[in-house]
Amino acid sequence: MGKLKKTMDLIRSRKAQNTLYDVAVANADRLFQAGDYDLANEEYENASRILPSEQYPKQKINEIVKIKVEAADQGRGVCSVNKKRRTNITMPKTGNRPFLNIRMLQK
């Protein structure tokens, strides 16, 4: 009976992880579609921590980074449409490697 209980506990644990992952991805997708890239990114990171082998959240995080970089390249600088929280993005050069400098703006 001990092996059966361990197996059932493992199945329940995996099912719970899958459910948590699905909820995090659904929230992230909803935020992404609404243009709230900062919060969407946080939810995709949560999903990635729950199931690290899944590629979808990592792909969406990369997509958000590309959107932010394109916004910075076009001089828009503000890439989140959430009115409570806006992000200013600049791309200073450090040596030969550029990096993103993301700073929260206060209203």
Image: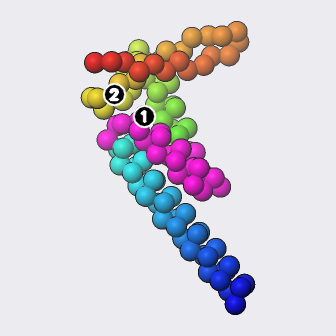
* Residue at x 42%, y 34% (from the top left corner): 38
Q: Regarding mark 1 in the picture, which secondary structure is present there? A: helix
Task: Sort mark 1 into few (<14), some (14-19) or many (20+) by Cα contacts within 10 Å.
Answer: many
12 on left or right of 95: left
Magenta-span inclusion, residue 79: no
Q: Residue at x 37, y 21 (%)?
A: 78
**Badge 2: residue crowd in 10 Å (few <14, some 14–19, many ≥20):** some
Residue type at numbered disc 1: Asp
Q: Nearer the viewer, residue 22 or 2?
A: 2
What quarter of the picture does the N terminus occupy?
A: bottom right
Instruction: Tell me the residue at 39%/26% (across/down).
Output: 79
Residue 106 image position (x, y, % from top left): 33, 18
Q: Establish if 104 lies above or below 63.
A: above
Relative to 17, say whether 104 is above or below: above
Residues at discs 1 and 2 in contact (Cβ within 8 Å): yes
Q: Earlier in the sequence, mark 1 or mark 2?
A: 1
Query: Could you say where residue 56 lies in the image, as x and y percent from the top left?
Result: 55, 51
Q: Give the alpha-carbon distance from disc 1 to disc 2, as whole Å.
A: 9 Å
Q: Is residue 2 left or right of residue 16?
A: right
Residue type indicated by callout 2:
Arg
Residue under label 2: 85
Q: How is the image coloured?
A: rainbow
Reply yes or no: does residue 40 show up in magenta.
yes
Q: Which is more toward the observer, 27 or 4? A: 4
On the image, the x and y values in percent for residue 33 come to 35, 44
Q: Quadrant of the C terminus?
A: top left
Residue that badge 1 annotates: 38
> Magenta region: which residues?
34-58
Q: Nearer the viewer, residue 2 or 28?
A: 2
Please report the residue visible at 59 percent of the width from the left and 50 percent of the height from the top: 49
* Quarter of the image where one finds residue 96: top right
